[in-house]
Amino acid sequence: MESNEGCRKVFEELMTPVDIAVMTDISIMSEPPEADILLFRRKLAGLKPQERMAGLSSEELKEIEQYINSLKNKK
């Protein structure tokens, strides 16, 4: 659970400056099993993907890519 909190904080730090809300603890199922999901919601609806990512540095983009790849490798 602690690593999930750390991941949430990393995504919040990276995404909040570009107006993307990071949401956690969203109820999607009424009964077990629980599911781990990351929900990103754009605050500015009219932007293209390139415009949304323009505010991130190359280091931040690399961190996001590495984290996503680590999630894929856990399967």
Image (cartoon, rainbow, N blue to C red):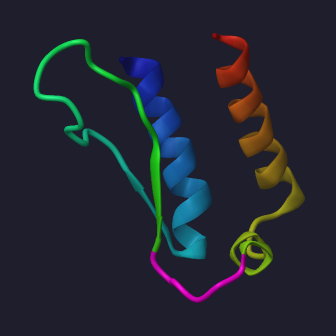
Q: Is 44 one of the magenta-colored residues?
A: yes
Give residue 20's position: percent from left, percent from top. Answer: 51, 67
Asked where in the image residue 41 lies, by quadrant, the reply is: bottom left
Identify the residue shown where x is 88% and y is 58%: 58
Taking the view exactly as shown, the residue that stands out farthest to the left is 30
Identify the residue shown where x is 73% and y is 14%: 73
Q: Is residue 43 above or below residue 37?
A: below
Taking the view exactly as shown, the residue that stands out farthest to the bottom is 46
Q: Is 30 one of the magenta-colored residues?
A: no
| Prevailing SS of the magenta stretch | loop
Q: Is residue 44 above or below residue 49?
A: below
Identify the residue shown where x is 39% and y is 26%: 36
Front-most of 65 and 63?
A: 65
Give residue 16's position: percent from left, percent from top. Answer: 51, 66
For the N terminus, give its image quadrant.
Answer: top left
Q: Is residue 61 above or below residue 32?
A: below
Identify the residue shown where x is 71% and y is 80%: 48
Segment tinted magenta in the rendering: 43-48
Asked where in the image residue 27 lies, by quadrant, the reply is: top left
How many marks do you count on the picture?
A: 0
71 with respect to 54 (left or right): left
60 with respect to 38 (left or right): right
Front-most of 15 and 52?
A: 52
Give residue 46's position: percent from left, percent from top. Answer: 58, 89
Give residue 45's position: percent from left, percent from top. Answer: 51, 83
For the C terminus, give its image quadrant.
Answer: top right
Taking the view exactly as shown, the residue that stands out farthest to the right is 58
